[in-house]
Image (cartoon, rainbow, N blue to C red):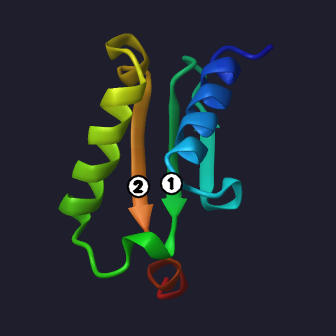
Amino acid sequence: MRLGQGFRDKLMSTLVAMGHACEEVHLEVTPEGRVAGHIVSDAFRGKTQMHRQHQLWKELRQRLTRAELARIVALLTVTPAEIADD
């Protein structure tokens, strides 16, 4: 198994358990085994980026260890409309 793939899978499962559909979550493993990605969801509509990130990381802190959290490079939170604007 590629370095970080197991953690990527765990993070995906965690985000799905938090209510995000698999097709909303896009994750990649860095060469160092860390994980980065983005979540595209209508649930973010009407919320500021700060509010989205605060909610996301509050829940992640409840579900993952500090060591696991440190393996997350970044998780962007966007709506489908924001993606379409590009």
Q: Residue at x 69, y 53 (%)?
A: 22
Q: Amino acid at mark 1?
A: His
In three-dimensional space, the C-alpha distance between marks 1 and 2, rounded to whole angstroms, equals: 4 Å
Whether residue 52 is situated above or below residue 48 in the rendered picture? above
- 69 left or right, relative to 46: right
Q: Residue at x 41, y 27 (%)?
A: 63
Local secondary structure at mark 2: strand
Circle 1/circle 2 CB separation < 8 Å? yes
Whether residue 36 is situated above or below residue 25 in the rendered picture? above
User: So how many labels did they put on this image?
Assistant: 2
Q: Nearer the viewer, residue 65 or 77?
A: 65
Per the rendering, the mark at residue 76 is 2
- 15 left or right, relative to 23: left
Q: Amino acid at mark 2?
A: Leu
Question: For residue 47, which quarter of the picture?
Answer: bottom left
Q: Nearer the viewer, residue 19 or 37?
A: 19
Query: Residue 9: where, in percent of width, then height?
Result: 68, 29
State the residue position of label 1. Answer: 38
Query: Residue 3: where, in percent of width, then height?
Result: 67, 14
- 47 left or right, relative to 36: left
- Mark 2, other Cα within 10 Å: few <14 / some 14–19 / many ≥20: some
